[in-house]
Amino acid sequence: MSAVKDWPAYNAALRVQGKDMTRLHPELMKGFGALSAGAAKTQHLDAKTRELIALAVAVTTRCDGCLDAHVAKALKAGATKAEMAEALGVAIALNAGAALTFSLHALDRADLPPA
């Protein structure tokens, strides 16, 4: 069991909520399923590479459900924890880059008079 989050319980809760959303808005969930299935059908990337990218994106978007799903899919596709760490390193670097870029925007705005 993880010291940070009970992932099996989290996943089970999401599945229950997903069923409720499907009942409340079936067309939305049908569309999401189609989008997800379409993105999974790649011609140039293997499943492991795709899942490592998805994992890095999950971190940058801070989506726990995505993180849970794509770690599991990456493992099933043969990714190692070390490979995941490298993909996560890219996400960490990009998040730091985004923070730097937005910090520069803040400093740029500081050159203007108060509104």
Image: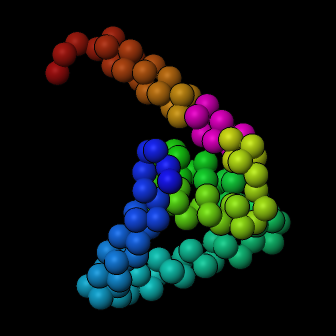
Could you say which quadrant of the image residue 102 lies in?
top left
In percent of the image, x 26 and y 85: which residue is there? 24
User: x%, y% of residue 79?
Assistant: 76, 56
| 18 left or right of 98 in image | left
In percent of the image, x 68 and y 41: which residue is there? 85
User: x%, y% of residue 67?
Assistant: 53, 56
Q: Is residue 87 magenta?
A: yes
In percent of the image, x 31 and y 79: which residue is there? 21
In percent of the image, x 67 and y 73: which residue is there? 40
Q: Is residue 10 magenta?
A: no
Between residue 79 and residue 4, name the one nearer to us: 4
* Vertical order, 86 against 96 (above or below): below
- In the image, the segment drawn in magenta is 86-94
User: x%, y% of residue 62?
Assistant: 45, 48
* Vertical order, 54 against 99 (above or below): below
Q: How many numbered marks are there?
A: 0
Asked whether residue 101 is in view, the answer is no
Q: How is the image coloured?
A: rainbow
User: x%, y% of residue 19?
Assistant: 35, 83
